[in-house]
Amino acid sequence: MRHSTSRALWPSERGPRVEVQRLDSRFAAYRDAVGLDPALEFHSLRRSYITHLIEDGHDPLFVQQQVGHDHASTTAIYTCVSSDFRTRSLRRVLDATIEAALRPGRTS
């Protein structure tokens, strides 16, 4: 819904669009009020959303389309999966590889 000449993202209930700076400053005020890390920013919510979709097993192409990225590499930049998720993923691949290698009738 962004207009090409404006940094505004969403229309408000009053008609004009909400500026990114307004969202950032409001988020920062709430973040500071509850004592969260100052490095946390409004855009962190987008990164979290993408990461949770990936960790919950959603198809990466679905996630890419959901957030409007043209390229999978952009979505990958936003994805900050946990070390636990990486360990589980690696374990799953290793288990499947070992199972295939030990399967009777393997030809190679």
Image: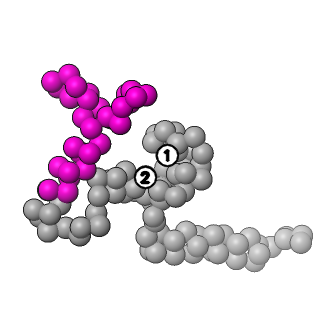
At 63% across and 74% down in the image, what residue appears? 95
Please state which of residues 34 and 89 is positioned toward the viewer in this rendering: 34
At 54% across and 56% down in the image, what residue appears? 76
Q: Earlier in the sequence, mark 2 or mark 1?
A: 2
* Residue 9, x across and y down, in percent: 33, 35
At 40% across and 55% down in the image, what residue appears? 47
Q: Is 60 left or right of 93, judged from the image as shown?
A: left
Please state which of residues 42 and 58 is positioned toward the viewer in this rendering: 42
Numbered range of the magenta stretch: 1-29
* Residue 54, x across and y down, in percent: 47, 55
Please state which of residues 3 and 50 is positioned toward the viewer in this rendering: 3
Q: Residue furthest right?
A: 107
Q: Which mark is residue 24?
A: none
Q: Secondary structure at mark 2?
A: helix
Number of other residues with Cα within 10 Å of mark 1, as a class: few under 14, some 14 to 19, many 20 or more:
some
Q: Which residue is mark 2?
A: 50
Say if the magenta span includes residue 75: no
Compared to residue 87, the image places residue 81 above or below, namely: above
Please state which of residues 18 and 55 is positioned toward the viewer in this rendering: 18
Which amino acid type corresponds to the residue marked 2 in the rendered image? Ile
* Residue 98, x across and y down, in percent: 70, 77
